[in-house]
Amino acid sequence: MRRALIPHKGYGIGDDWVFYLLILIMLSPLLVMSTASAESGKNTQPIQIPNPSADLWREVRQRDAIAVGNSQVKSADSGVLINPYGDKWRNFRMTQLIPYGGYLLAGMLLLLIIFFIVRGRIKVVSGMSDKKLFRYSLYERTIHWCLAAIFLFLAFTGLILLFGRSLLIPIVGQEFFSLLASASKEGHNLFGPLFAVALVLVFFRFVRRNIYQKGDLTWLLKGGGLIGKGHVPSNFFNMGEKSMFWMLVLVGGVIVGSGLVLVFPVFGQGRVLMELSHVSHGITTLVMIVVIMGHIYIGSVGMEGALDGMTTGYCDLNWAKEHHEQWAELCEEQNEVIMEDEVSRLQGDTKANSMPSSLTQETGQ
Amino acid sequence: MIGELIDGPLWYFAFGVFVLGVIYRIISILRAGLKKDFSRPRAEGSAGALRTLFSRFIPRRDVATRGRLTVIAGYLFHLGLFALLIFAQPHVTFFSERITGFSWPALPYWAFIVSAELAFIGLLLLWLHRVLHPVTRLLSSIDDYVGIGLVFLVMLTGCLALAQAFEPLRLLHLFLAELLLIYFPFSNLMHAFTFAFSRAYTGATMARKGVNA
Amino acid sequence: MSYNFAKGIEVLDQQIDSRIEAYFSSCVHCGLCAEACLFYTETSDPRYTPIYKLEPMRRLWREKHTFWGKFLIKMGLSQPLKEQDFADWETLVYDSCTMCGRCSMVCPVGIDITYMIRKEREGFSAAGYTPVGLQEATKRALTIGSPMGVTLKTLKAALVHVEKSTGLKIPLDQSGADYMALFSSMEVVNFPEYIESVARIFAAANVSWTISSEAFEATNSGIQIGSHDAAKEIVSRVVIAAEALGVKYVISPECGHAYTAIRWEGPNLIGRAYKFEVIHILELLDQLQKEGRLQFTGKTDTPLTFHDPCQIVRRGGVIESPRTLLDSVSSGFVEMTDHGSMNWCCGGGGGVSANERAEDLRLKVFDRKKQQIESLGVTTMVTSCANCRIVLEEGIEDREMDVEVIGLTELLAEYLMDNSTPAA
């Protein structure tokens, strides 16, 4: 199957860009707060009666800096008796990551519902036609859905691990939750490296079509046609989709990296590195879940004709003209438009006993 | 109480159905009979049978290219599954206690995990290919999907129980494995045994004609 | 045409032996057979997946020989095989399959799909769901003696022509000769050069041979349509004549399915071993050359390639002889990338070329052969099956290519080193 090679178009993910900004805005208090708490020392009241061991304990407690001592046990961080950041990290997780993360996810869900109520399903203005364009090969669809399935499983188990204690224990009780958490942890850890593999495959396959081009900025400035009527011309992937791709790759890279540090604690990682990895893993994954929620929305319910490409491999010509105009034109120029019943034949939907009509029209070619 | 059922009677029942079912299926294949071949052979059939039994593990050049996703994912899944099924420590313990009476060397833990990951990605890719490729979608029946589904669930629950700290998780895994054993002889999962027969029959017939198939 | 659904089911069920039971038990629907099938690769139509062509037989196996099949039928949750299924599958079984055997070579669990198609056709022909062209060819074969209607008179006329141009006498009904030669109707009608070449070669090699006026036809349309009775009748004529003449060998000519019929299926059709041996013409020529009885002089340096007839090479086992012989008379022989036992079918075997309804499909799938030839850049193709020859020539004409097709025996005869016979 040949396709127009250069700039293709995809289905609109553009709305995510507005939400990225929202996310950044929502995240900034988090960042501000964590840096603030890191910097502010505790205001301790000077003790009236000098404690003869104060100096000793001050050093042990290591309020000012981490001092490494000697220990018979030889392993990572074994010379550090008490890690001062541990408490800060724990507080961050309990009082900020979990609640704000929860608000973020709930907020995104709410936003999508409101968007759907207000804007409705974005229809193909000229209606679906009987002409199709070949959009995604079998390999591309396979690795996309592989990545998607693994991501969903990791998100599901990851959310159980993050929110379970606060949300699930009240419902299922402590004993069952410990079983659930153990299962989630094992599943999450096993499938993590598979996500890395799938991400690499997706990266190499789609990177060429995601290079930013002329026209992308215009698309962005017009809000991708998301706000208000009218569509904006775009290539195989529009600006929003390209940005989501790069976000997936870069943020995904951090997720994978931090995840690998966390799941293989046998390479001498110290506590601080583990804490940092955990924090980055937590924040980046929540960001990614929010973005993917938008991706899933627009690819299924949110837009008519969007899902077809990634399931059947073919998308509607009118849909392509409206959302990925330049790519659709390129395909038309190169005579790559396929009729609906030819697509049907290729899918094996014709009855067993009928001869394909296209064959009888074949000339020596 | 349910745990005792799963560890006890249900296990014996499932294992029994599996063993007797497999034997029954193989016997019915053999009983269908083969007419004698009166043509003069170029070579002995038995040598060809043995040859083809092993040569089909290596796909032909052009099919290996056209069907490379199936070949690669197929091997990832099968090799991963066999490694973990037969050589993972919890399984070695299980088999030696309940079936064989003797044990054998097990894989180190990290190798067990790697095998599991290869098996999972292989199975996931194979299932997606089955659903997305027009040929396999046309051919596939409920039997195929139930078989894949059960195998996946067994693998998944095994993974979930990896910490080996919660009885309910282990029992869930065992229970699903028992369902799989009961389902096995009446499905095309039987290919695990019958492939030897089909390869051998074809290999013998083709060798008699003087063709290395 | 009369249909007999009940008979079709009965015959189809009788075909299910250990091999077929093992095969259906092992198929996991991986779809790799499609990647080897000419009809799938050139049309991308998933219905041409080889194992899919066997659906009617699979469903019968399932409903009669498996637990779930029997159970679901009894529960009324599954439908038994219907007459409409025969009607629906006729084109898949006859138009889009030449029984070329490529699928059987690649199945990971070793299923011989080709064998199963052959057996499935038994059911279809008993039910009456076969292509009109094949039915008529078989009728002619049974009543006249040749699927193309070639009579003894036609053959004798051709022989007279050969005798005139070679100056040789063609031995007819010679009792006690070593070899009895068969010919396919296609050769007699379209490529009589084959008969002439054989006559000259046998004279030069001093071969004791004969033709039987009772049974000279090699083609067996019973094999193609899938009728055990017709196939048996046609083979029996050859066996009776050969055993009556007391020959040591019967020579199968340059015709694909003829070889399969007489060499591999024949004894099983009549239920006993022959009192003679079957040898393919190429095997014989190879043997004669090795014995020094057949010598060639000169070689052609034209770049050429060889199209392997499926039934002779992959399904017949005559793989090396054509190559050894070609090397003796050609210095520019290049193999196709997929050659020998994995070469691609011409698209017209197994009865497809006798089936007018399948013509468009057959011409379409010729693209594969076209691509094989073009990637080599040759304009000459040698083959050793008269049916392949005509099908290839039709494909070449349809695709407006400039390629010449030559018969191997004919080519060999051109380079015969012989002093006794005046040149043709």
Image (tube, coloured by chain):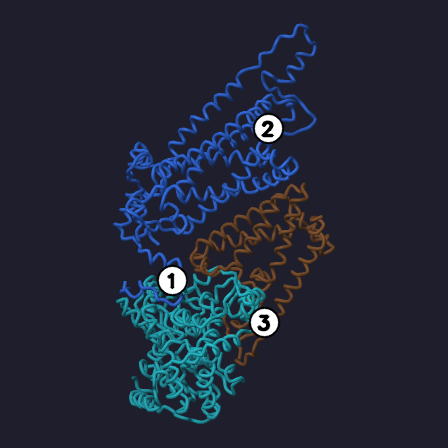
Amino acid type at mark 3: Ser
Q: Position of residue A82 (x, y in %)?
A: 64, 22
Q: Is residue C310 above or below residue A290?
A: below
Tell me the residue at 63%/58% (across/down). B182
Q: Nearer the viewer, mark 3 or mark 2?
A: 2
Which chain did the renderer colour brown?
B
Q: Is residue B52 visible?
A: no
Callout 3: chain = B
Task: Answer few, some or many: residues within 10 Å of disc 2's Cα (few below 14, many 20 plus, some between 14 and 19).
Answer: some
Q: Position of residue B37 (x, y in %)?
A: 55, 79
Local secondary structure at mark 1: loop
Amino acid type at mark 1: Thr
Task: Answer few, some or many: residues within 10 Å of disc 3's Cα (few below 14, many 20 plus, some between 14 and 19).
Answer: some
Q: Is residue A295 above or below residue C61?
A: above
Residue at the spot of label 2:
A270
**Residue positioned most to the right:** B101
Amino acid type at mark 2: Gly
Tell me the number on the disc at residue A350: 1
Task: Answer few, some or many: residues within 10 Å of disc 1's Cα (few below 14, many 20 plus, some between 14 and 19).
Answer: some
Q: Is residue C280 left or right of residue C21?
A: left
Q: Mark 1 or mark 2, which has the lower sequence index?
A: 2
Which chain did the renderer colour cyan?
C
Q: Colour of chain A?
A: blue
